[in-house]
Amino acid sequence: MFMKKVLVLYYSRTGNTERMASAVAKGAQISDKVEVELTFHVEPKELNLFDAIIVGTPTYHHEMPMDFKKLFEEAAVQGITLKGKIGAAFGSYGWSGEAPKLILEIMKNRFEMQVESPILAKYVPDEKTLDACRELGKKVSENLMNRI
Ligand SMILES: Cc1cc2nc3c(=O)[nH]c(=O)nc-3n(C[C@H](O)[C@H](O)[C@H](O)COP(=O)(O)O)c2cc1C
């Protein structure tokens, strides 16, 4: 069986989304047939090396971070194909929390990815939320393992 690759890409200024990202990555590591990359930067052309793309994004000023906007913008301009790949998003927020939803919208509507529901944490993620993050990672990897 081929190796499956999961990207956990995140941004975090004060560590809240980072905690969630670590839990997602841990949950995704279900087998030595799955390679999980936890990072805060990828080039647009690297995106299609992965079978699943999970993005951790806090909300600042009702937006996703500029880096992520640029990443998806450039991927679209470069004609990067992500159709059918699994997409997911999560993140910490303070009061409105739009960013994970915005990322999922782009994944679904522009890139035709298969998206999961987002996980949100108000400021510091509690244990229950971190469990949900681990579950999200696990679910994504299990879905990949069940694909031929
Ligand atoms: C300058 C500033 C702007 C923010 N804007 C928003 C916002 O528009 N909506 C929201 O839900 N939270 C907002 N927040 C709260 C952050 O999303 C929250 O602190 C979050 O936990 C940061 O996650 P991080 O530690 O991963 O960077 C803002 C915080 C700061 C400091």
Image (spheres, rainbow, N blue to C red):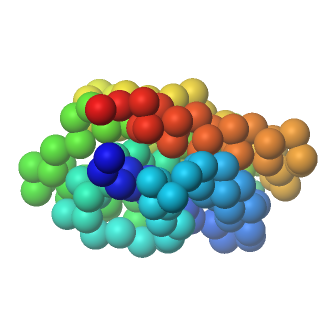
Percent x, y of residue 132: 75, 38
On the rendered structure, is 137 left or right of 96?
A: left
The relative height of residue 61 versus residue 147 in the rendered view (above or below) is below
* Ligand 1 visible in quadrant: bottom right
- Residue depicted at x 58% and y 34%: 139
Percent x, y of residue 87: 42, 39
- Residue depicted at x 71% and y 55%: 23
Pick the front one: 92 or 6: 6
* Residue 51 in sight: yes
Total residue callouts = 0
Q: Residue furthest front?
A: 1
- Residue depicted at x 26% and y 58%: 49
Image-quadrant location for residue 147: top left
* Residue 65 in sight: no
On the rendered structure, is 10 left or right of 13?
A: left
- Residue depicted at x 69% and y 38%: 135
- Quadrant assignment for the C terminus: top left
Pick the front one: 52 or 92: 52
Percent x, y of residue 98: 58, 38
Pick the front one: 66 or 12: 12
Percent x, y of residue 27: 66, 49
The relative height of residue 39 versus residue 69 in the rendered view (above or below) is below
Pick the front one: 81 or 95: 81
